[in-house]
Structures are given as C-alpha cells and as structure tokens.
Image (cartoon, rainbow, N blue to C red):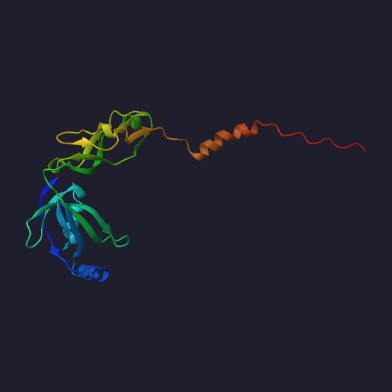
Amino acid sequence: MRKDITIAAEPRATRGKNEARRLRVEHKIPAVVYGAGGDPIAVTVSPKEINKILFSASGHNTIFDLEIPGQTKAPVLVVDWQHDPVKGNLLHIDMMRVDMSKRLVVKVPVHTTGEARGVKQQGGLFQVVNREVEIECLPDDIPEFFTLDITEMMLGDGLRASDVPISGSMTLVSRPEMVLSHVIAVRGSASEAEGEAEPAAAAVAPAPEPAAKKK
C-alpha cells in the first residue's frame, strides 16, 4: 500500500563495521536500495523513520518515497531488515525500488474476528496455524491485512488460504489448501490419563507365589 511518506537518504562511500558504528552514533543506519532496472546504491537513513514504517499498520508492505540528493524520488519497499537481538535497535535495511505498473509478490497478515461457536458451545480450542498469506498484485492494491470471521466455526472446522477475500488485481500465491486456523478438541490432562490407567492396573491379578518345596 502506497503512503504519502518521504524518507531522506544520503549516499555513503565507505562500508564496514567501523563505518556502521560511526553512523549509529549519528543516529543513522546503513542501507542499500536496488531494483527496477537501477544500480544498487549504498545510502544512510534514519532508523527512527524506518521503524515508524515497520511498526505501522501496513508494516513492511508500506510503499514510500525515498529521496536521494541529485536523484528523482523513487517509491520503495523495505524488503529486509536487521534488529540487534539484545537491544532491539535497527541495524541495517535493504530497500527495493517499486515499479507501480508491475505486479509484486508480498506476504499479507491475516486477522480474525469473532469467537468460534466450537469454543463457546463445544469446549474446543481455536488455534492459529499460519498468520499470513502470499499474494501477487499491483502495488496500489496491496492490502494492510485480511480479516476472516470465525464465529460459525465448530469443532473440526478450519480456515484455509482459499478463504481469503481476493479482489482487484490480487491473485493467491500461497497454496489454496494451506491451513490458517482451526478449532480442535482439547486433550485431557496427564493426571486424568493416569487416573484412567489405575483401575486397569488394579484389575490385573498378581502372579501366584511358587509353592514351598517339601522336606
């Protein structure tokens, strides 16, 4: 989904860990932009601005404008990023130029609404198996997310990728039979299973003791 957002970027000539540390001190991070027939360019961007995009409703599917001095603004997507595993700081991103007239393959989150009848009335458990589907569409048709109603789901019912509401230029790339969520029966606890096993064990007669030898 294209948003009216412009991120400023600056070309960078040097690379390496020392350069990356210096940039982070200046509240910048290294990045690369490529694609749409153009040459790859090493740049720096603001991690604060990029995080706003990554944590927005449309997330990494947000198409925004990248402005590099001396070049025409270009629509781009964040296609890869790295966060520090301890501190959580954004360390690096890859951006891809987007041709708005060509189709893209993207992963879109799937949300659910309602409470399944199989949970309320039958004591089942609603379980999410896959949280996103892959589709192909024109850039302007990328949705923020899909929403599926689970209210009528009973025990044994499931939602599959083919249940996602496809419209416009969208086509489904994920396998249609891929399970997104289902309602399953809740298994008994281990203590219940042990309790059921005790009577069976008690029903087994002990083996007779060997007869004493006659003197």
Please name the residue shown 70% across and 31% down the image.
205
Residue 4 picture location, percent across and down: 9, 50
Asked whether residue 115 is in view, the answer is: no
Residue 204 vs residue 16, the one in the foreground: 16
Query: Compared with residue 153, is residue 105 higher up or lower down, i.e. above or below?
Result: below
**Which picture quadrant has residue 101?**
top left
Location of residue 70 (image quadrant): bottom left
Residue 15 or residue 26, whichever sits in front: 15
- Position of residue 62 relative to residue 211, above or below, is below
Left or right placement of residue 184 versus residue 198 in this view: left
Describe residue 63's horizontal placement relative to residue 90 as left or right.
Answer: left
Q: Quadrant of residue 139?
A: top left
Residue 28 is situated, as x and y percent measured from the top left of the image, at 18, 65
Give residue 44's position: percent from left, percent from top: 17, 63
Viewport quadrant of the C terminus? top right
**The N terminus appears in which quarter of the rendering?**
top left
Q: Which residue lies furthest to the right in this view?
A: 215
Report whether 124 appears left or right of 171: right
Residue 33 visible? The answer is yes
Residue 110, placed above or below residue 10: above
